Amino acid sequence: MGKAEKERLKQTLNFHLNTIHETFQVLDQRPASSLEKVSWEEVITIGDQVSKQATMAGMLWTGEMPDVKALDENMSAYFNTLQGFLLLSHGSMVGAGHTLSSSIHASVKQVVDCSFKLLMESVSSYAGSRNNVQKLSIPQLVGAVWEACSALKKTPSTNITAIGRGMTQVAVSLKDVLREMKELKPGSSDQTDETYDEASNKADGDPQDDDDNSCEDDLGNDLLPGEMKIAQSAIGVVSDTLAVIKELIRTITGLLKMENPNNTEFVDCLEKLLKLCQGIGAQIDELGACLYPPQEVPAMKASLEKISSIIDDLLVELESVKGTSQAFLQACDGMRNSLRLFEHELGCSSTSDLEAKLQDVTLSN
């Protein structure tokens, strides 16, 4: 291949890359509600076409040296398909809320990124110093495009599905924090407490509890008795928080039978509820981190105040769509009780710390 032909390939690639990059920016803009919505099935279908183009590109660029015209035509066909994929993806975002739009954007970006890597590596292997390593990497990049296109089938296609998955992710995160809290142990084997066992059993039978035994020298296994009581109370808070999130998901599922899932106000309400759930999840993460010695009591108190405020906001949002079920109210009441008990335990801990310090001063004198 001559120098002029290599340069032509590079220029053609850069032209297509710039065009696709400009088209991709359209996904950052919410389409007008007056536009006709494209079904996600259409996006999946053209995604399959992108996979086929990737397969053809892999066969062409890893085979015997083709002429420049064949390479040029291959790139044009690939990028034309990719551009159609982007435009249909944008059309599928008509009426999409923030969460659904973000999910679609992430899935589409993965397809585009993998396609860019495939064609950039292909051109590099021919226009540059082609070697066996580069040639062998191309099938792997084709496989990455396949996986990205296949993942489109798992991408949520409705606001409800996207928001529901977001809330489920918060619940999963809370389970992880709960599991880690239950692994906290007192400094010595004789410092066990029945309250710890009772609090641990509130975790709804977390299947990960018995996965593996923590080592005796793991971080957190040297909690003092007072610190252990705080950890026990924290387990109750997280367990009851998880119950609230689960009940919220059930409540929303029930609302779908009465509300139009495409109603803008309803979707906006669900978006707010998801954001509040994620806020609770962030505070629970902070709370879990504060339990490791030395425990940060002021930070834990701050998290409790924020969680309590978020629960109030959850109730307000649900009430706006007539969704405050009795079961959800009971879950919130249970969580508030746990928060009060935890706050009391933190107050007792502060008093004990002060008494211990005073005693040390007395002994030193």
Image (tube, grey):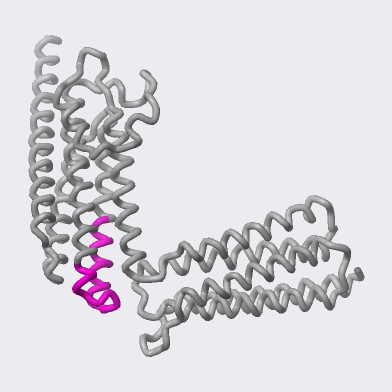
* Residue 289 visible somewhere in the drawing: no
Query: At x 16% / y 21%, what residue is drawn?
Result: 193
Residue furthest right as drawn: 2
Q: Which residues are magenta?
A: 255-277
223 or 206: nearer the eye?
Answer: 206
From the viewer's perspective, tell me whether residue 86 is left or right of residue 172. Answer: right
Q: Quadrant of residue 205?
A: top left
Query: At x 19% / y 48%, what residue is drawn?
Result: 243
Query: At x 71% / y 65%, what residue is drawn?
Result: 55
Quadrant where the image shows the C terminus: top left
Quadrant where the image shows the N terminus: bottom right
* Residue 188 visible somewhere in the drawing: yes
Q: Quadrant of residue 5?
A: bottom right
Residue furthest front as drawn: 257
From the viewer's perspective, tell me whether residue 310 is left or right of residue 136. Answer: left
Whether the magenta-drawn stretch holds residue 63 is answered as: no
281 or 323: nearer the eye?
Answer: 323
